[in-house]
Amino acid sequence: MGSRRELRYGLTFISPAILFFLLFWILPVVLAVGYSLTDWIVGRSARLVGLRNYVALFTDPRFHESLLATLKITLPALVGTCGLALFLALLLNDDKLRGRRVAMLIIILPFVTDWVATGLVWQLIYLPNSGVLAGLFSQLGLRQWMTLRWTTSRQLAPLAIALFTIWKTTGLYAIIFLAGLKSVPTPQLEAAQVDGANFWQTLAFITLPLMRPLVVFVLVSAFVSIVGFFEPVYMLTGGGPADATRTLPIFLYENFFQFHKGGYASAAGIVFLFLCLGFALIAARFLQYSYYE
Amino acid sequence: MAHAKRALKYLVLGLYCVITLIPFLWMISASFKRPQDVLTVPIQWIPAVWQPQNYRQALFEPRFTGYSIADFMGNSLFVAVITSLLSVFLSTFIGYGFAKFRFRGRDALLWGMLSTTLLPFSSVVIPLYLIVRALGLIDSLWALIIPFAITGQSIFLARQFIITVPSELMDAARVDGAGEFHIFWRIVFPLLGPAVATLGIMTFLFSWNLFLWPLVVLSSQRQFTLPLGLSLMGLGSTFLVDYHLWMAASTLAVLPPLVFFLLLQRPYLRGLETLSGLKE
């Protein structure tokens, strides 16, 4: 069993993946970098303009607005999703709990269903005066909240999108946290209890440190997916009112597919891609040992 | 004390489950209503008049240029099924190479491929669009299939499953003179039932729920997938928005992935755990 043989067959089996990643990952990025250096308007011919698109991007107030909007939605959605997911996982981590399986299935339901169908429902949930939230508020005696314009006011729209996102994605991370909690060895937990640690001390000093790789995984993957979500914004506000919810994915989509600014949008896309890539590579180093141990 | 704690646990979990379910329950209830009963305060949870024919109307009534939600559903099924099949075969084939052969650069390659899963899809949409356009696949259903037939996730999942297959089985076959492809196809693949179920359900759900990608690559309504058709349902309808039909169509869109998920919940949840890096 020479290592040449291993190499030959190994490469043969993974060759479809190598071709595929070259064609659908490497080449596209090279293409996009190329276009980002031109003044290409989709449908017309392109001319090289050097780094002009990048300069324009970093001085574009709409790009700054977009970064701000992304932050305003991502932060509450990330904190809400991860916090709630951990909380639910702690509640569910109890073998004697009845109906645990059913609760798990219900909690992950929003995640396995699609953004558009649930987005249409959430449009109607948020309708002022006659929507589902308004109906619930009226039954709870909070009539003054019925008129809240969830998706059309600058203050509430980012929150409305964050709430929809939290509802949609929390289940996934709750299930992952739960699996992590189950893998924490019980002797350590019992030792902590014998030493008189209360629930929160055990969580902070024993459980979470033992699941550190998993916590990193959840934070990283929740961050990159929430930062990149296009659908909740598209379904609820379309980026409005004004620029309040025009997140980076919406910004890219509009510039390329609606305004046809191929060169400019490619530059913005490359910036977004490399921001995420840098983040992902750093995160991947953190994660490495958790995969290979 | 312990009893009170447990009761509180049930209460909080129950409450969260109800909150999670409210949008679904409201959707189903609205899908059976008359248009004027959909948005009422207080909410009518039980329709005053039941209209199951909403479903027939939502499903078969031509929407825009003569295509109906049923046509879009057919496209979605086609795309999700073909993508899942391709993914199962390709990922296990590739995963076998990563799991059972040792060579320089193997781990670096796997890492490169796996780190693509840490990129949001929206950050690669423009580059991917450029290449798919160059390949002449714009406005074709294959544009929704080919780029997702192999993903870093599916390769990693397959590898994690295949690594647990004992190498002695393969060595024994090699001694008998079997070729490597024969070994993969006749000995390893038949042992991968659980991996196939996991890969299948995960790819199916991913593909069925795709929205941004079909939105940018599809232009003719003949090709629309269900989420895309659904998002444009408001167009071309009567002045009064047909919310009851929207909700019937949404219910129909949620149904196939839900049934499939409930049937394959175990492999699906196991897949999530494997992807999170937890050992079996």
Image (spheres, coloured by chain):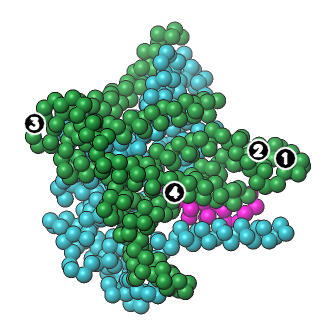
Q: CA distance from mark 2 to mark 4?
A: 27 Å
Q: Which residues are magenta?
A: A95-111
Give the secondary structure at mark 2: helix
Q: Inspect the image, locate mark 1, and give the three-letter code of the amino acid beneath it.
A: Ala
Closer to the chain start, of discs 4 and 3, is 3
Packing grade of label 1 (10 A; few <14, some 14-19, many >=20) is some
The chain letter corresponding to green is: A
Where is residue B253? Give x, y as percent.
Answer: 37, 64
Q: Secondary structure at mark 3?
A: loop
Instruction: Determine crowd level at label 2: few under 14, some 14-19, many 20+ residues with C-alpha closer than 10 A.
Output: some
- What numbered label is drawn on residue A192? 1
Are tags 3 and 2 found on a single chain?
yes
Magenta span: predominant SS is: helix
Q: Amino acid at mark 3?
A: Ser
Q: Residue at x 54, y 16 (%)?
A: B175
Same-chain check, marks 1 and 3 = yes
Mark 3–mark 2 Cα distance, whole angstroms, equals 61 Å
* Quadrant hosting residue B28: bottom left
- Are the residues tagged 2 and 1 within 8 Å (C-beta)? yes
> Which sits earlier in the primary sequence, circle 1 or circle 3?
3
**Is disc 2 in the same subunit as disc 1?**
yes
The answer to whether residue A178 shows anywhere in this view is yes
B250 over A81 or under it: above or below: below
Q: Which residue is mark 3?
A: A45
**Element type at mark 1:** helix
The chain letter for the residue carrying disc 4 is A
Give the CA distance from mark 4 to mark 1. 33 Å
Rendered location of residue B63, percent (x, y): 21, 69
Disc 2: which residue: A206
Rendered colour, chain B: cyan
* Distance from the alpha carbon under mark 4 to that under mark 3: 43 Å
**In the drawing, what numbered circle is on residue A76?**
4
